Amino acid sequence: MGRERSDGSESQAKGLEDLTTHQREELLRVAWMYHDYQWFRFVAEERGFEAANDPNQAILGRMAHAEMMRLMRALDVREVNDMPTLVRCSGPPANFTWEGCVR
């Protein structure tokens, strides 16, 4: 059931509780990507590209380690010491597509 807009028409808008897990994840992912883009753009415009890029590259290394540890905990992997475990921890999810990611 839709909700009435101020002009009297009905919208298909839902409450947050009606969103699927995928929709909530997508909203968070896009919001974070936009925040990251805006942060980088602001610093680059204010202080120059290198002033934004140098710390960004350093942070990526820290994030990669933290995200791998978080993923390993989620997958209940204690250590990566063989190829099947590495693939399990680093391969794209089954529903992942590159469409829209690479131009």
Image (spheres, rainbow, N blue to C red):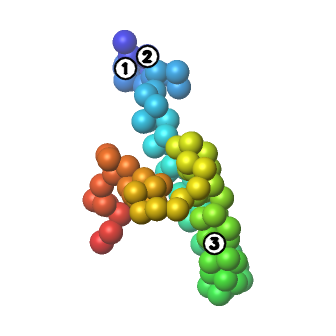
Callout 3: 10 Å neighbours few (<14), some, many (20+)?
Answer: few
Instruction: Give coordinates of residue 24: x percent, y percent.
Output: 49, 35
- Per the model, the C-alpha gap separating discs 2 and 3 is 48 Å
Instruction: Tell me what residue is drawn at x 62 percent, y 70 percent.
Output: 60
Q: Amino acid at mark 1?
A: Ser
| Residue hosting label 3 | 61
Callout 2: 10 Å neighbours few (<14), some, many (20+)?
Answer: few
Instruction: Give coordinates of residue 97: x percent, y percent.
Output: 30, 55
Q: Which mark is residue 4?
A: 2
Instruction: Give coordinates of residue 64: x percent, y percent.
Output: 60, 65
Instruction: Tell me what residue is drawn at x 28 percent, y 59 percent.
Output: 99
Are circles 2 and 1 on residues that touch, CB within 8 Å?
A: yes
Viewer-side residue, 27 vs 10? 27
Q: Quadrant of residue 101?
A: bottom left
For the image shown, how many numbered marks are present on the structure? 3
Query: Which residue reaches farthest front?
Result: 82
Are circles 1 and 3 on residues that touch, CB within 8 Å?
A: no
Instruction: Tell me what residue is drawn at x 65 percent, y 87 percent.
Output: 50
Instruction: Give coordinates of residue 29: x percent, y percent.
Output: 51, 49
Whichever of labels 2 and 1 marks the residue nearer the N terminus, that label is: 2
- Callout 1: helix, strand or loop? loop
Q: Amino acid at mark 2?
A: Glu
> Closer to the observer: label 2 or label 3?
3
Q: Is residue 15 left or right of residue 84?
A: right
Relative to 66, say whether 70 is above or below: above
Question: Which corner quadrant holds the N terminus?
Answer: top left
Q: Which mark is residue 9?
A: 1
Residue 28 shows in this picture? no
Relative to 46, say whether 38 is above or below: above
Q: Is residue 87 left or right of residue 77?
A: left
Q: Amino acid at mark 3?
A: Gly
- Callout 3: helix, strand or loop? helix
